[in-house]
């Protein structure tokens, strides 16, 4: 929530998603020298058959072993510079994946393929 953006309140679904990602080490985070989070992103690894459902925000049972990355939560306090750094780190973590996508709450919750991501 401290990253701002579309996060006005913490929901149960948000908590469950973040905890699942933390437990499976499917996240990136940047913390400054004072201990404040600068940006955070976490993702599910879903199966290709679950992509269309996830576009409608239907969470599949298996979010750990698939070949498509869905960035489920992300926050950034560093502006464009932070977004560029965060995207580079997520791309590195997505190596070998068949694709990466996310919802953009600040853009009417539209689904976007990850910038420059190659794959299905």
Image (cartoon, helix red, strand yellow):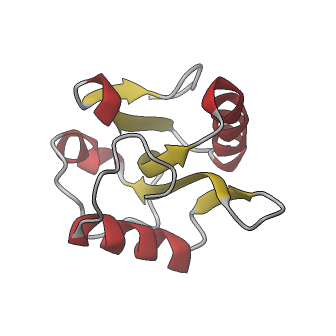
At x 28% / y 43%, what residue is drawn? Answer: 51
Q: Position of residue 43 (x, y in %)?
A: 47, 55
In the rendered image, which quarter is residue 15 located in? Answer: bottom left
Q: Where is residue 50 in the image (x, y as percent from the top left)?
A: 25, 50
Quadrant showing the N terminus? bottom left
In the displayed structure, does residue 114 sit left or right of residue 108? Answer: right
Q: Position of residue 7 (x, y in %)?
A: 34, 50
Q: Nearer the viewer, residue 119 or 103?
A: 103
At x 78% / y 57%, what residue is drawn? Answer: 32
Quadrant showing the C terminus? top left
**Which residue of the protein is positioned furthest toward the top in this rendering?**
116
Above or below: residue 1 compared with residue 19: above
The number of numbered badges drawn on the structure is 0
Q: Nearer the viewer, residue 46 or 24?
A: 24
Q: Where is residue 89 in the image (x, y as percent from the top left)?
A: 71, 43
Above or below: residue 66 compared with residue 19: above
At x 27% / y 59%, what residue is drawn? Answer: 9
In the rendered image, which quarter is residue 59 located in? Answer: bottom left
In the displayed structure, does residue 100 sit left or right of residue 110? Answer: right
In the rendered image, which quarter is residue 6 located in? Answer: top left
Q: Which of 13 and 64 is in front in this view?
A: 13
**Which residue of the protein is positioned furthest toward the front in this rendering?**
34
**Which residue of the protein is positioned furthest toward the bottom in this rendering?**
23
**Which residue of the protein is positioned furthest toward the right in this rendering?**
33
At x 64% / y 44%, what residue is drawn? Answer: 90
């Amino acid at each position: 929530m401290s990253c701002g953006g579309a996060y006005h309140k913490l929901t149960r679904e948000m908590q469950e998603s973040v905890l699942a990602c933390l437990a499976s080490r499917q996240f990136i985070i940047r913390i400054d020298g004072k201990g404040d989070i600068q940006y955070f992103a976490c993702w599910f690894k879903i199966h290709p058959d679950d992509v269309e459902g996830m576009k409608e925000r239907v969470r599949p049972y298996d979010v750990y072993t698939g070949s498509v990355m869905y960035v489920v939560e992300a926050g950034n306090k560093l502006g464009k510079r932070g977004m560029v750094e965060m995207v580079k780190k997520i791309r590195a973590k997505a190596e070998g994946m068949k694709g990466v996508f996310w919802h953009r709450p600040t853009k009417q919750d539209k689904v976007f393929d990850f910038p420059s991501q190659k794959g299905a």
